[in-house]
Image (cartoon, rainbow, N blue to C red):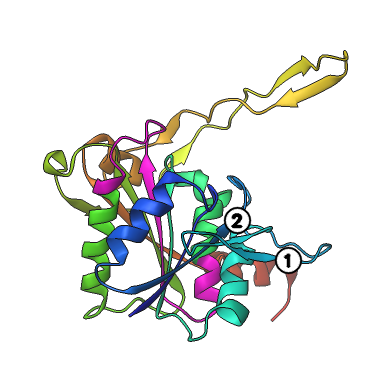
Amino acid sequence: MRILLSNDDGVHAKGIAILYHALSQIAEVTVIGPDRNCSGASSSLTLLNPLRATTLDNGFISVNGTPTDCVHLGVNQLMEAKPDLVVAGINCGANLGDDTLYSGTVAAAMEGRHMGLPAIAVSLCSKREAHYETAAAVTVDIIKRLNAHPLPKDQILNLNVPDIPLSELKGMKVTRLGARHKAETMTKREDPWGREIYWYGSLGNESDAGEGTDFHAINSGYASITPLQIDMTAHSSIDAMKTWLQVD
């Protein structure tokens, strides 16, 4: 098996190194990551500047672009043979609920799916970075199962894992996305020259974190696995819209 491994925390991040070593036990792994932290990049592409790829001393490839650029460039140009699977992570911090809209980790996996490949996004639900090995072990387990149960062509898996020892993990839960209250914590400051600057604050609190959600699974000590689909069409609204727009 050939795996393309990317992330949004940057090619030098701890999470991608630990996941690389775990995946290397079961596959041939090529690491292609952004040259800096691109958290919150979503599915953005670099269209106005050329992309450059640099092979580092450890064999990882650094790209001066976004997570989506890394996957697209890797599949189209940098890998000699097409990968069998795209994996993004391990992200430092959760990608739950609404977070998935902004996540560069999820976007990297989505780009893999756009390229016709099965894909998994992996996140560790903490900024402490204490137990990446737990997330890596769960990822390996899921990949082994995918051989017998391939993903539908329009879906990826969004895996979130509590930052706890593997021995304390209660298991895995298949979940739906929860939701947060809107964030209202953007602050206004001044830089050293007296100019106004603005800074994002903390995420909104959980608003839909009941049983069955990804939030509930993590809060209960389980790894959360949410199948995400690329087609964002609100199919349930199509017939109603045809009626009030008076179109076929």
Left or right, residue 92 beside residue 163: right
Residue drawn at x 67%, y 72% is: 242
Magenta stretch in the rendered image: 110-134
Please state if 86 lies on the left or on the right of 114 as rendered: left
Q: Residue at x 20, y 52 (%)?
A: 172
Regarding residue 248, the answer to whether it shows in the image is yes
Q: Is residue 75 above or below residue 132?
A: below
Q: Position of residue 134 (x, y in %)?
A: 24, 47
Which amino acid, mark 2? Pro
Checking the image for residue 34, the label placed there is: 2
**Please, is residue 68 above or below residue 239 in the view?**
above
Kind of element beneath mark 2 = strand
Tell me the residue at 31%/64% (across/down).
23
15 versus 139 height, above or below: above
Specify the quadrant that holds the C terminus: bottom right
Which one is in front, 45 or 10? 10
Type of residue at label 1?
Leu
Residue 197: x and y in percent read 80, 23
Residue 195 sits inside the magenta stretch: no
- Compared with residue 187, is residue 55 higher up or lower down, i.e. above or below? below
Q: Which residue is mark 1?
A: 51
Mark 1 neighbour class, 10 Å CA radius: few under 14, some 14 to 19, many 20 or more? some
Instruction: State the residue in front, 210 or 220.
Output: 220
Mark 2 closeness class: few <14, some 14–19, many ≥20 residues within 10 Å? many
In three-dimensional space, the C-alpha distance between marks 1 and 2, rounded to whole angstroms, equals 11 Å
229, 112: nearer the viewer: 112
Task: Tell me if residue 95 can be seen.
Answer: no
Q: Give how far across and how far down residue 202 sits, in percent.
A: 55, 26
| Picture quarter with the N terminus | bottom left
Residue at 31%, 59% (x, y): give it.
21
N-term-proximal mark, 1 vs 2: 2
